[in-house]
Image: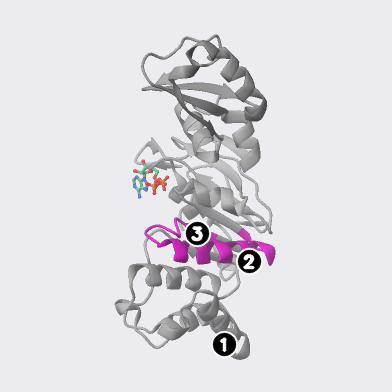
Amino acid sequence: MSFNACDALTGVTLNADRGEVLAVIGPNGAGKTTLISIVAGLLAPSSGCTRVLGLDATGESKALRGRIGLAGQDIAVYPAHTVEENLRFFGSLNGLRRRELTGAVEELLEVLQLGDLRKKRAAILSGGQRRRLHVGCALVYRPDVVMLDEPTAGADPETRQQLLRIVCQQASRGSLVVYTTHYLAEVEELRARVAVLAHGRIVAEGTVDRLIADHAASELALRFEGALPTVDWPGARVLADTLLLPTSNPTTDIVHALEAVAEHREQLCGLEIIRADLERAYFNIVTDGGCS
Ligand SMILES: Nc1ncnc2c1ncn2[C@@H]1O[C@H](COP(=O)(O)OP(=O)(O)OP(=O)(O)O)[C@@H](O)[C@H]1O
């Protein structure tokens, strides 16, 4: 995908199935929103094709209407309409009628904890409340594919938990959820399959566990008072007053680490296991281009 001869996405191939959460992560400008916009049929790729539910996302976008729910990065609700009117509008626009529409709206008002605000105009909602409504408008017609571009940006911890619960619920009902975020703890919590984008390319893909196993090591952090000992330990590094020792088996290696610094035991004032996590793997992936 090119904008004014600059490539925003190059050679991206991604497959995802209904019932799963695919988290697309990557630095600012990596191409996440561009990718989502192409899948949603809002942008036509300069070359290649995108098939969604067996249909061409660009050429057959009309047939896909109502089957794809998109909550983009910018909040798009009608400020002069109430919370309930917004949900009803997006539901009916995408084919829901009467009982089905009422059922879907009531369910979302409850799940999104917007019930008490149903008669309030969207204009007077707080930022987090408005974001919940924005996500609700993409879900109300129960689409098969749900795309959420940074749905938790600016949300408080409670709102974030609600939104994560909804994402899991959508996937368990059989929708494919494509989710972008800069909060990697959310991706771990969702146990999502992950695609890491950098400079418009997929540089890593897999489950959270796979990415951590392939791209991050746990470390033993040994903090000293005074001079740090020199140890014979592959990949050992120093950070201020702390010696960091990579390990694939922290509980066993603690014993070896203590043996390695035995002569400096008196100066040892702290020992901590820093577990490998997605954030660590992510940094390694985006700084070395995905090579483990
Ligand atoms: N309409 C456009 N015209 C020109 N360039 C664009 C346009 N939309 C996006 N780009 C460029 O494409 C690249 C990818 O942008 P995109 O918004 O997809 O990134 P992103 O990964 O979603 O970033 P962020 O995390 O900051 O939201 C950027 O370099 C951006 O400047």
Residue 84 screen position, x and y as percent: 45, 84
Q: Amino acid at mark 2?
A: Gln
- Which badge, 3 or 1, is on the more N-terminal residue? 1
Towards the viewer: 173 or 88: 173
Label 3 residue SS: strand
Towards the viewer: 21 or 273: 273
Residue 16 screen position, x and y as percent: 65, 50
Query: What residue would you read off at disc 2?
Result: 169
Q: Is residue 178 above or below residue 90?
A: above
Label 1 residue SS: helix
Q: CA distance from mark 3 to mark 2?
A: 14 Å
Query: What residue would you read off at disc 3?
Result: 148
Towards the viewer: 130 or 275: 275
Residue 163 in sight here: yes
Whether tag 2 and tag 1 are in contact, CB under 8 A, the answer is no
Does any atom of ligand 1 lie closer than 8 Å to the CB of label 1?
no
Looking at the image, residue 230 sits to the left or right of residue 188; the answer is left
Residue range corresponding to the magenta coloring: 147-176
Whether tag 3 and tag 1 are in contact, CB under 8 A, the answer is no
Q: Amino acid at mark 3?
A: Leu
**Disc 2 crowd, CA 10 A, few/some/many (<14, 14-19, 20+):** few
- Which badge, 3 or 2, is on the more N-terminal residue? 3
